[in-house]
Amino acid sequence: MIKLILVRHGQSIWNAENRFTGWVDVDLSEKGKKEAKKSGELIRELNINIDISYTSYLKRAIETLTIILKTLNLSMKFNTSWKINERNYGSLTGLNKEETKKKLGEEQFKRYRRSWDVAPPPMAEDSQYFENFGPLNSGIQKNKIPLTESLKNTYERVVPFYDLEIKKNLKNGKNILISAHGNSLRALCKYLFKISDTKINELEIPTGNPLIIEFDNQLKIKKYYYLDKSRAKNIIFNQ
């Protein structure tokens, strides 16, 4: 079986502070570093070869992948792409989620946070947070950097990247590891598991818990499971 391993980065400092992070380049928390190491230990128990690895332009995902590869005693060069960056939360970036919920009301808050195609108001073009997008993101053409995104917008960059870059390596029988983000992985899972626009709001991706997807030679999904059963979340398949 060909394996695709999806890992949401370990808890970040802003995750711990319950803030909308998006493209802001924040570090892993100490808990997040431990989650990344645990991910590596769980993957090591599979006793398989990791042939290719991918991550985003954001250091919390890069650091997670680096820790995993170190735990696996692998010195491979990994691939980075902004196409699997976290969703840009627009004007919500940096805000505390509980305070924002009280201000917006629960219904509007859920619409911005979990709906398929509703994006928050855009980030101001003079926002301080542009300076905190990280050095790799500075190489992206300015007109390609989103000021806000819905999950649909995120899907529209993640899925073409998967189809053009990742799928060909899976077809060649390569086991692939991706360290990315809650929403970029939700977008990819929507595509792989054929989750409907209305059901995708129910999909949660836990931090630092590898999701294994096993394919046959025709890239049909045969099996899928989280390695840490105690923190597994439901995967919604073909709904």
Image (spheres, rainbow, N blue to C red):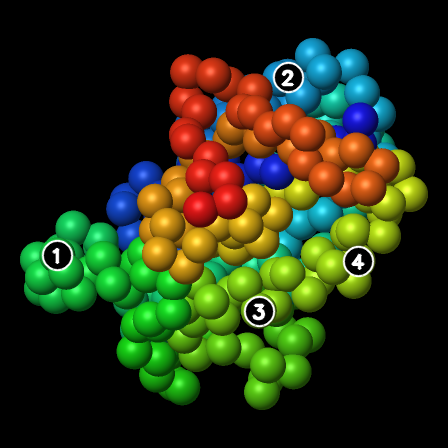
Q: Residues within 10 Å of mark 3 (few under 14, many from 20)?
A: some
**Three-letter amino acid code at the position of disc 3:** Glu
Q: Which residue is mark 2?
A: 41
Of tags 4 and 2, which is closer to the observer?
4
Image quarter of residue 7: top right
Which is more toward the observer, 27 or 177?
Answer: 177
- Residue 156 marker: 3
Q: Residues within 10 Å of mark 4 (few under 14, many from 20)?
A: few
Report whether residue 43 is seen. Answer: yes
- Above or below residue 40? Residue 86 is below
In this image, 202 relative to 208: left or right? Answer: left
Q: Position of residue 15 (x, y in %)?
A: 35, 44
Of tags 2 and 1, which is closer to the observer?
1
Q: Residue at x 49, y 77 (%)?
A: 146
Label 2, label 1: how many angstroms apart (C-alpha)? Answer: 38 Å
- Residue 106 marker: 1
Could you tell which of marks 4 and 2 lies nearer the N-terminus? 2
- The answer to whether mark 1 and mark 4 are in CB contact below 8 A is no
Q: Which residue is mark 4?
A: 165
Which is more toward the observer, 58 or 187?
Answer: 187
Report whether residue 62 is seen. Answer: no
Could you tell which of marks 1 and 3 lies nearer the N-terminus? 1
**Three-letter amino acid code at the position of disc 1:** Glu
Label 2, label 3: how many angstroms apart (C-alpha)? Answer: 33 Å
